[in-house]
Image: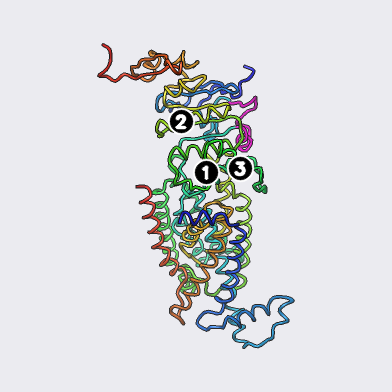
Amino acid sequence: MQRKRLKNGETSVGRICFVLALISVLTMIFATGLGPVSVAPGTTARILTSRIPIVGGLVEHSWEQLDENIIIGLRLPRVCLGLVVGASLAVCGVTMQALVRNNLADPFILGVSNGAAAFATLGMLFGAFSFLGTYSLSISAFIGSAVTIIFVYMISRVRGRVNIMQLLLSGVAISMIMDGITSIIKLSAPNALGLHNAEFWMSGSLAGAKWAYLTLPLAVLLICMAVLMINYRGLNLLLLGEESAGALGVNVSRLQKVLVLLTSLMAGTTIAVSGTIGFVGLMVPHFTRLWVGSDHKRVLPVSALLGGILVVWVDVAARCLIAPEELPVGVLTAVIGGPMFIWMLKKRGVRRA
Amino acid sequence: MPDARLEVRDLCYSYSGADNAADHVSFHVDKGSFVGLIGPNGSGKSTVLKNIYRALRPDGGSITLDGEDLLKMSHRESALKLAVVGQENELPFDFTVEEIVAMGRSPHKKLFDTDTAQDKAIVHHALEHLGMADMAKRSYLNLSGGEKQRTIIARAVAQESDFLILDEPTNHLDISYQMQIFDLIKRLNTTVLSAIHDLNMAALYCDYVYILKHGKIVLHGVPEDVLTEENISRVYGVDCCVSRHPVTKKISITFLPEGLRKE
């Protein structure tokens, strides 16, 4: 594994990203067709191309209107949302891991998702943040995740260092508190319909994706990626520890504040549209690092692409496994990611001993 | 002192507000000299160094580097002048040796700068200087303690600052690595301020030493004047026998265990 990674670390990140981008496009074509009602990939590709300006006119209109409705109206926004949500969660994981210098950090494990969910439920069921308009759900989820990250970070710092035991335990504690708050909110909810929606949303689902859901998470993802890529040296140095990073010219406390802000933004906006999809931020960065090394210049773009692809395919499985019923995608990522987390924990133990 | 590079005056720092980890510490480091900070565990060596390399913020006093107020510089400006080799070099994720050394170039980089051929040459040169050119692609986590420390020193070399701060750089290393590390640092011909645990090492390599106890500087001078039997007994509370070594012409300290004392 070691040898392989070092050899691959040499291949240009550009080439890897190109291949992954290609796979993302293929994923869009294939995944859009799959579901309770399947549409052949060829048809999907033609429907999709017909929507592209200029080239679109060249495609012969030879499919049924129903197929087009399913593809354009239902599946495509869902797949696109999957790509954006997956990328955001993976990048969010990478950022949190640099912030706490630990590869076990993930928005779900550290309770950030639950924090966002608690605040979002409050908004959903009581309209607590309705004065914020269209984006009230996103903003309430953002506030929730920011509050949780700051709490967990403060609790887990012992003498200026993030202690891993403290980190995981404070994550567990905060998740439980936030879960409790969510339950209280749900039990005192004024209407049953809102409650049902909140339940499904909270278990993490991309069903019911609309084009309108995409704008904010995509914008946040692009902005956060840009800021992170500009600061990739700082992220690398942060892994050396705060003192070394400071001695190498990083304004540590400023960078940490920026990272808390970025992770809260990404976690909040994605959770607002997809609920809690756990473990993506844990699994994707881990495999990315095994593949391309730890340099954030490579880790950030590669894990963004991998995260997107992973979530889209897990979502395909979620809608096909027990069709015509649907599994929430968060349930599936938990089933896959949980064992993986345990494996990583055990492996750490072996390395320490 | 025309060629004093670092000037620390009345530096005070306390961790909890009650204790005095550094209590009005004043000293200076001249250009090109190798200055040692020595003292028992918990005497404040690391605390003083951390205040200088800005991991801690002094409660009082002043620190000037080349006549400029160090505390008013940006982190990047001070990183261009000071390179630090700390005690703990644990990494949560794996990097190659080359990547770690290349991190020494960061203070030279503005936000949108990319790594240039010149950076690569500097990194390569640093690795060669430390005799690690063939390890460039090795993974850092698989290195031995001594190799890790050499990588970190190579990083400091790649940083191209001409002032090196070392915080017990040879802690936990066996004797061959200790000698190797200090020899390499000596060969760099830069100004060095180092906390040193081992008094014999301090006697062999330092041009000037400051002895700290309970956060105060209690003695300072050239090693020959300061490291005497009574001083060591006073500061460390152990009996020893100090002599000139016939080969090194430096002083050599032999500690005397209870069972082997003269009386």
Name the front one of labels 3 and 1. 1
Write down the region rendered in magenta: B63-81
The answer to whether mark 3 and mark 1 are in CB contact below 8 A is no
In the image, taking residue B128 as reference, residue B244 lies left or right, namely left
Q: Is residue A26 visible?
A: yes
In the image, taking residue B119 as reference, residue B50 lies left or right, namely left
Q: Residue visible at 45% across and 80% down? A: A325
Name the front one of labels 2 and 1. 1
- Mark identifier at residue B106: 3
Secondary structure beneath dot 2 equals: loop
* Dot placed on the residue nearer the N-terminal end, 3 or 1: 3
Residue B200 point in image, percent of width and height: 42, 22
Residues beneath discs 2 and 1 located on the same chain = yes
Q: Is residue A243 visible?
A: no
Q: Which residue is mark 2?
A: B168
Residue A105 point in image, percent of width and height: 46, 54
Distance between the alpha carbons at the discs numbered 2 and 1: 26 Å
* Residue B64 included in the magenta stretch of the image: yes
Distance between the alpha carbons at the discs numbered 3 and 2: 24 Å
Q: Residue visible at 56% across and 79% down? A: A33
Q: Which residue is mark 1?
A: B134
Residue type at numbered disc 2: Glu
> Badge 3, how many Cα within 10 Å: few under 14, some, many 20+?
many
